[in-house]
Amino acid sequence: MTGPAQGRLMVPAVLLALMSVALPGWGRPAQPDRGSDMSERSGRVTRFESVEYTTQGGADLGFGLHERETRLRVDLDTRVAFLNRHQPTSTEGGEAIGTFRATLSPDLVSRLQEDLARADLGQIPSGNAGGPGTSLIRIRALGAAKDLTASFSSRDMATLDKLESLLSLLDDTVGLVAQHPFQAIRLELQVQHTPSRAFVIKIENVGTETVAIPDLEMLSHESRDQPDHGIGVRVAANPPERPGYTTPPLRWSRVEAGPADGPHAHPLLLPPGGARDIYATAWAESCPSGQLLAQAFFSFYAGPAVVDGHLMMRGHALSTGLDLAR
Amino acid sequence: MLWRHGVLALTPTWGEERNIVLASSFVADALRREEGCEYLPVDEALRRFEWLKRQPMSSWKVRQFVSDAGLRANLWEMNDWEVANFIRVAIERRSVCGLRKIDKAGKRVDATTEQRRLVRNIEKQTRGHLNFSGRQYKLVVDVDLGQVPGRNSYEVAGRDEALRVLDGLAKEAGAAGDLGALLVQASAKLTPDWRPPRQPDGLILLRRIRQSNTPVKDTGPAITPSQMKDILYKKRVVSIAWNAAEAWCSEDATAEGKTKNYAPGDSVEVTFQEHDGSQHQTVTTTVASDSFGARWTVTEILPVKRGGHLAPDLKMDATAEGVTSPKPLAVMFITQLNKVVHVQNRTHFELSLTDNVVLVGSEIKYVKGWGGEVVKLGNKVPAGTGGLLDGQLSWSGYRWMKSVGLGKRFWDGTAWQNLPAGFVLADSNNFAVGFYLQDTSFTCQYGGTWPEAFTDWNIDADDNRRIIAAWTNNIEKTWTGKFDLKRKECKSSDKRCCRYSTKAVVAFSKQATFSTGMLIVADGNIRSNDSLLFLGETRIAVAAHEFGHHLGNPDEYAGAAVDTSLNSDGATNGIDPDSIMGQNLTKVKARHLREICKVFTDAVTGAFGKSYHYLVVPP
């Protein structure tokens, strides 16, 4: 097979190969469920070898990557946890996106084992509350004799209630592993202290591996009116709080980014600690007056997962906010 | 000598003017054609008739003429004066004409040849069917008028009408072939209007007379011997009539007829012709015992516009050998349906049919609202922390959460607090909820009230109106014209037959107060849900997805209440990412019109008593 068809097949193949390296056991065939939990009946605690926790929501924005997508895998034997996160958990910003890797404490792994044993994932009914604005949550626990999966939506309240302890532990684990970037970038926003007060958006490789990023100028150029593709700054009026009143939601205006420092390439490889700056100018003219809040954004879902053996940074990232006054 | 049965000599039978006669208009036409006669002016015909009246035996001759010419049947009830007066009136009305035989010079031969060639070419191009505005026409050269087969089935169209018809036909022909050019040539060669005794000079457009086989009490025009021979021995269709008053597409209707002088096994061609229209079909059937039945399966007949709308019926005449059914068959169509309202659980829409377009409408009622969030903090807050909504919401462990700038705060029962350190927001522990104003409190769509006031906002601001208009437009664009409904039993090969396009018509309707089933429209953009839509929602297709629920479609999301029996057209166990009901909010699939199809089918049965089946098909 040659040509485009071959190229199409290479991407998932490379991705699978990379995941297999990064995550021991990732490509292992699923073990069939061999029946009821004999170990519990015999008084022994079920032991799982690994657990996968995925959250997926929104549209497929390219190459199988959804608008919201987070994947955590914990090898319960080696205690190595691997997180693939494509967007921040909140709008607060400053969170890195990419992959993260950490070794968990024995205590945390032990609690995960206990909660997994208690959760009885095989008995969780399939979700039925999905739809727009919800995410599909999937927990898969693999053991020598078990392969249990629970799949439900973020609005299947009874399941969320039943799995509250396990979900809380898994979310904690996500938060913990996210402190250890492996192949990840973080956005930072600064304002130049010059008369033009241009924004400077810095993309930094905060991980330990070289990563690929798209050509930022091209991304900026393509970003107009596309909510899921682009780089720039969003600015909103941020009126002071009124006691007793919930402030209205922020109404963002976009300031497109302009020229970027350094050589142009697509994709661009960023070594660990490497950074690229891109500027956004003329923001003052297009923004509301008064107290302002500015935040850099990066949205890129369309590229392949891996380029030249390096993970492409895909997803949505936000910088921490900057308070400004006009 | 200009004499034949049914004429009255108006001159002595000797001398130069012996060949002046009176004849019925029918016979006069034959004489003009066959004998080279010309018409006398009316005053001359009257003068010569008065001369005749003064001649011996004139009364007897006049009575004989009236009788032979078949002008009047009840002669015995009239005295001589009345008979003479009857003739005078007939001359004035030109139902009786004076004729003089003239020498026919070989004039206009070249022109005639050219005109005949033109007529032949037009007939060739139109295959002999010159139809316009529901009428059949025939072009003839002036000298051929008398030889037109079935001449009695035609009447002469005036020059103005002829020009209009030929011009209209030329326009219809357009640039296709050279028919248009031929018709333009024919227009230029049309004869001026004429009346006897003047002669036509050019092409004549004949208009087919709509015939009826209803017996006429009047004796009608005079019958020539040759016609009498025809009547006695020629094969002819005596009558034809439909055996039913109406028929629907793909049903059978039969035109039954009586014949004369047909041998068993002879065939007769029956034409089913749209009354006042151009749609027609022909079948050939066999005569047995001087009768026939031409069965017609109603197909390939489309409704026509009447009064600006597609008419629910269309009249079809059955014609055989110039005899037309006295009453047409009404071919019935389903072109209009009154509005039906379909409400079943979450499904609610209105359906109607106008001019073969199925209108699927839904009023989307909404109220102005606000967006907030709930969060499940679990053991990340100390035991006894207030603000739990247990008892207000139907789920336990949640508290109100709001955004302040870029951060989040939760309500502890007395104040807003920052989220506890170490707490990780995840899709599993928080989500957006909608609020609406009820009296003075802000009520959550799932129960409970917001602990403070939301800042008011103007839902009618131009920007917001534009967004709601964009939702409306997106829904209509997404759901209009993607599939048609087609009657399964339709036997027509014309794909337009029994086919209905679909059109979505949506109206967002703002309500003063909230009630179950309404949408809450909120400012900002958190995460919309099935009854909460944020104006900042970037996935505009969410509105079209929700409209899909109004049409009775389940989600096709993983993790949703899917219909696991869906296993085609991209769906696997009810899940189809590439669908407007699926995760990517993309395409409308045929299955998404199932409920519309079902409601339409039921509505057709209810309104027309027809147990038709409809399929959802690509347009």
Image: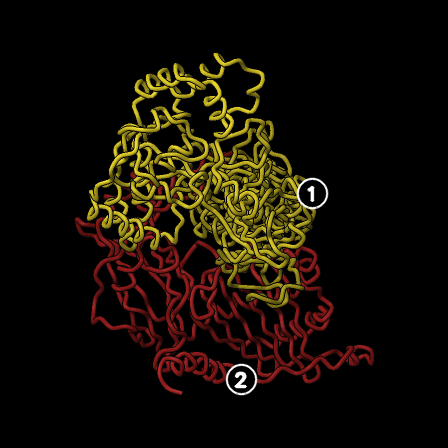
Pinpoint residue B420: horizontal percent, then vertical percent: 55, 54
Q: Is residue B472 left or right of residue B180?
A: right
- Which color scheme is applied? by chain
Pinpoint residue B187: horizontal percent, then vertical percent: 26, 41
Q: Is residue B515 above or below residue A265?
A: above
Which numbered tag is attached to residue B87? none
Image quadrant assignment for residue B452: top right
Chain B pictured colour: yellow
**Residue B357 appears anywhere in the view:** no
Estimate how packed mark 1 is, as few (under 14), some (14 to 19) or many (20 or more) residues with alpha carbons within 10 Å.
Answer: few
Comparing A276 with A148, the one in front is A148
Three-letter amino acid code of the residue under disc 2:
Pro
**Residue A62 appears anywhere in the view:** yes
Q: Which residue is mark 1?
A: B609
Name the element at disc 2. Answer: loop
Q: Which residue is mark 2?
A: A24
Question: Dividing the image into 4 quarters, which one contains the C terminus of chain A?
Answer: top left
